[in-house]
Image: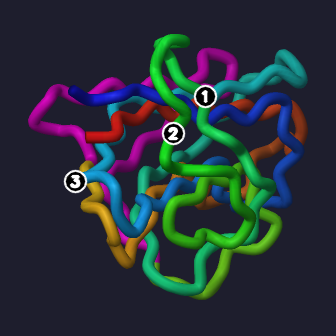
Amino acid sequence: MARKYTVVGSNLTVAGATTLAFIRPPASGLKEIKITKVEVSFSDNATSAQTRVQLVTQVTAFPTSTAATPQPLDLGQPVSLIVGGTAGAAGTAGINASVEGAGSKTVRYEAAFNNLNGWLWVPTVEGEITLPVNSASGFGVYLPAAPATLTGWSVSVEFEEV
């Protein structure tokens, strides 16, 4: 049975075009991870602006992030096989990249949203982004252009370990 976890970044100050969250599957112990929900929101002011967001996979030369330990959505389940990490190593998660890394990003989904409303992505089962165990790629939530205001950003990524 799949176990569900979330990686959260709250009230982040971004450095411009930024990976808000990055998750890479572990080298073993699972079949895959499935990204089942992503939310991006903004809280710093009441000025309306459009913001672009991309859901990406990235290979090698990963972002340098702040470590973020996935939290279980069911408090009775075991801890995630993915741990907090800063460099995109296998089996790690991070938030708010300070350096993007030179690895190639492949856009899997793109949208633009009004920052006052925030953005919620809940795919159909057929639209879930899946990364196999021991994948050379990681999953990222990426702002491809610097937002008008750099402070007050939050991100949540829900995923399943299968």
CA gap between label 1 and label 3 equals 19 Å
Numbered disc in front, either 1 or 2: 2
When the figure is inspected, residue 57 is found, relative to residue 82, above or below; the finding is: below
CA gap between label 2 and label 3 equals 14 Å
Disc 3 element: loop
N-term-proximal mark, 1 vs 3 = 3
Picture quarter containing residue 66? bottom right
In the rendered image, which quarter contains the C terminus? top left
Return the x and y of residue 107 as percentages of the image width and height: 36, 62
Disc 1 element: strand
N-term-proximal mark, 2 vs 3 = 3
Mark 1: which amino acid?
A: Gln
User: Disc 3 marks which residue?
Assistant: 31
Residue sitting at x 46%, y 52%: 54
Q: Nearer the viewer, residue 144 or 85?
A: 85
Q: Nearer the viewer, residue 114 or 94?
A: 94
Return the x and y of residue 86 as percentages of the image width and height: 74, 65
